[in-house]
Amino acid sequence: MPVIFLYLFKLSLSLVIVYLFYRFVLQRLTFYNWNRFYLFAYTVLSFFIPFINITPVLERNEMVNNKALQFIPSITTLGSTNSEMPLQADSAVSFSLWDWALLLFGAGVLVMLTRMLMQLFSFRKIVNKATLISNDSVKLYQVNQSIIPFSFGNSIFINKQQHTEQELEEIISHEFVHIRQKHTIDIVWSELLCILNWYNPFVWLIRKSIRQNLEFIADDKVLQSGIDKKQYQYLLLKVTGNNHFSIASQFNFSSLKKRIAMMNKMKSANAQLIKFLFMLPLVAILLVAFRNNSTELTKLKKHRYSVSVDTPVKILSDTLPGDSKPYILEVLINKKGNDTTIVVRDKNKKEVKRMSIAEWNEKESYYENLYG
């Protein structure tokens, strides 16, 4: 498997773990700001986890062959050369399946990027047509069309004709929370996640969770300011409708029922904050799964081979003490394919036997006894 797809696979797996942990452990808690930090920090961390190789640490502590760790499959093994697609004979003009997959991935990223640019262009059109009402610490715009109130960046967009003065006060209080806490950063990050991982359905669920949690934060702050809970919930029902600017943080979203339920939910006890630490063992499991533990190299390391750069294709060469005389074992890789060959030579470097690594693995004990 090409390196880029192995990385994308590891990244996708990391993001799946991030979402599932949030969905089944954290979502029902009322620690909304902690949840915000979790969703942002761990999705960012997921892009770096695939680069971390803990194999040297395991080797120093003699844990490479630990039975408990062996229960966790190595993702690198799953993506080893056994799963490579051989190149076509005329590789200059033909594409392998991996080439087509990379082309599809790039096309998807381009489509998603175009989608985001169109959303930003739509936002600029709204700003150009809107009337600036206030330009203090927050810009307040009047939009002369039927819209759902929303905020983006440092601006709030409303239609005064659609709401009473009291309703506008509550709406602006809600949107002001989004602006003061810079929720636009989270919104834009969730969109970038979808651009780079458009193929992963769990990333779209993360995007929804990020937006949903931001609304929980704003609702909680509004209610803490002393606004009547029932009155505020009736206002939410009144402004329910379709999105007009989907990239923005909106006053309404589809799971309004969930939003109201969270307002009526009893506050989580501080002791439940310990649940956030449960993610650390999952990260540790990911690091173990992402260790460099290729099947072929693992088998070869048992013989304590040393690396050689004598030729471009000879990757390993070592002298192995046999029962009566030493042998030299060379491991060769065909650069145009995925074939790996083992060559056994005597002490005078005369070739004794040549075989594929698959043949060696089938009779590993036999060849170990024969050659050392």
Image: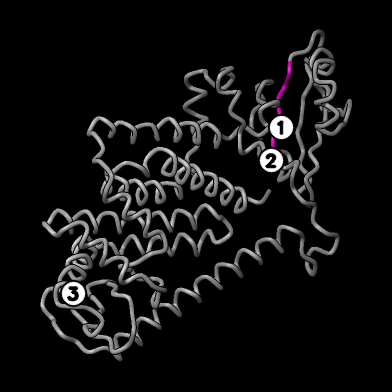
Splitting the image into 4 quarters, where does residue 217 fall? bottom left
- Compared with residue 244, is residue 329 higher up or lower down, i.e. above or below? above
How far apart marks 2 and 3 lie (CA) works out to: 60 Å
Of the numbered discs in the image, which one, if any, rests on residue 359?
none
- Please give the label number shown on residue 296: 1
Residues packed near mark 1 inside 10 Å, few (<14), some (14 to 19) or many (20 plus): some
The boundaries of the magenta stretch are 315-320
Circle 2 residue = 80
Circles 2 and 3 in contact, beta carbons < 8 Å: no
Q: Residues within 10 Å of mark 3 (few under 14, many from 20)?
A: some
Tell me: 283 left or right of 5: left
Q: Position of residue 57 (x, y in %)?
A: 47, 27
Question: What is the magenta segment's predominant secondary structure?
Answer: strand
Q: Is residue 265 left or right of residue 355?
A: left
Q: For the residue marked with disc 1, what is the amino acid? A: Glu
Q: Do the numbered discs 1 and 2 sit on residues whose CB atoms are within 8 Å?
A: yes
Q: Residue at x 66, y 51 (%)?
A: 2
